[in-house]
Image (spheres, rainbow, N blue to C red):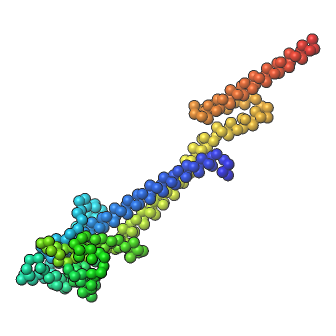
Amino acid sequence: MLASIRTRLTLSYLAVIVVAMSLSGFLLLSLLERYFLQAVEDSLVAQARITAQALIPGSRAEGPPIEIPASAFNTLQQQRGSNISLQTQNVAPPPAEAPPGDVDLGYLADASLQLSSQLDTRIRILDAQGMVLMDSQQEDQRTDLGEDPLVAQALAGQYASRTDHGGGDQKAMHVALPVLIEGRLVGVVYLSQSLQDATAVLHDLRIRWLLSTAIALALSGVVGLLLSGAIARPLRRLTAAAGAVARGQLDQQVPVRSRDELGRLSQAFNQMTARLRAARQAQVDFVANVSHELRT
């Protein structure tokens, strides 16, 4: 089967297509995954800043700058931002007698249920010691998260993020932003969000890429058969003509239909057969002359 040049040419076409589409698909999916992860992280950072501003007046959440918002998440961020502002209208203000920069976040202990109804992002507000003051998904609060690496880094005044590469609902992104008031650390905003939607989109893109690859391979196979047939057809003519010459049929000629290597090969074959016929005719004429002279 592989002895046929047409088969080898077709397989070579398909091999090139497979390699090209595999590399391009891998790079494209990798870039899309990085884009989605960055968009989710930017969305969480924006939510954290909105949450800190809504719950802790005068505070500022430290985090990376979002210079170019991810367009795929602009609408989502705006929707979540409006939900946060609506849900926090009834949060009690901090005590007025607290001195500037020395804010006790204990008043946030009753705000968790007000945020959990419309937000799928888990929002936790921690004090300066790493104790959970508010959790949008759990009623049991006052959990010590000081040993969490992200919380520890945020308590040190640095932004921290982590992506859990698990399976299903276990794949999630976490960000922790230190909350400052007049340069003093008063707490941490700790957000977590499942990456199930982004994973589902990437899974759908992988399936579509595999389907498009299969369709491309089928079409490339048909085109490869046509192209390899166009290349192999002159070679088959030359092979048949050469076999006929080997059997003594020197009147073989093949059509010259191109100026490429196959065309020049066909032209050289025609010149060779013409010279063989001339040499054979000269041999016949010489034998005839010798016979005539001998008879004379």
- Relative placement, left or right, of 265 versus 276 is left
- Relative placement, left or right, of 286 versus 294 is left
Q: Position of residue 262 (x, y in %)?
A: 61, 35
Residue visible at 67% across and 40% down?
236
Residue visible at 16% across and 82% down?
105
- Relative placement, left or right, of 280 versus 78 is right
Residue visible at 24% across and 87% down?
142
Residue visible at 33% across and 71% down?
162
Q: Position of residue 238 (x, y in %)?
A: 68, 36
Evaluate whether residue 115 shows in this view: no
Residue sticking out furthest to the bottom: 140
Q: Position of residue 55 (x, y in %)?
A: 16, 77
Asked whether 154 or 115 is in front, the reply is: 154
As drawn, 128 above or below 46: below
Q: Quadrant of residue 78?
A: bottom left
Q: Quadrant of residue 127?
A: bottom left
As drawn, 130 above or below 265: below
Residue sticking out furthest to the front: 156
Asked whether 60 or 294 is in front, the reply is: 60
Residue sticking out furthest to the left: 97
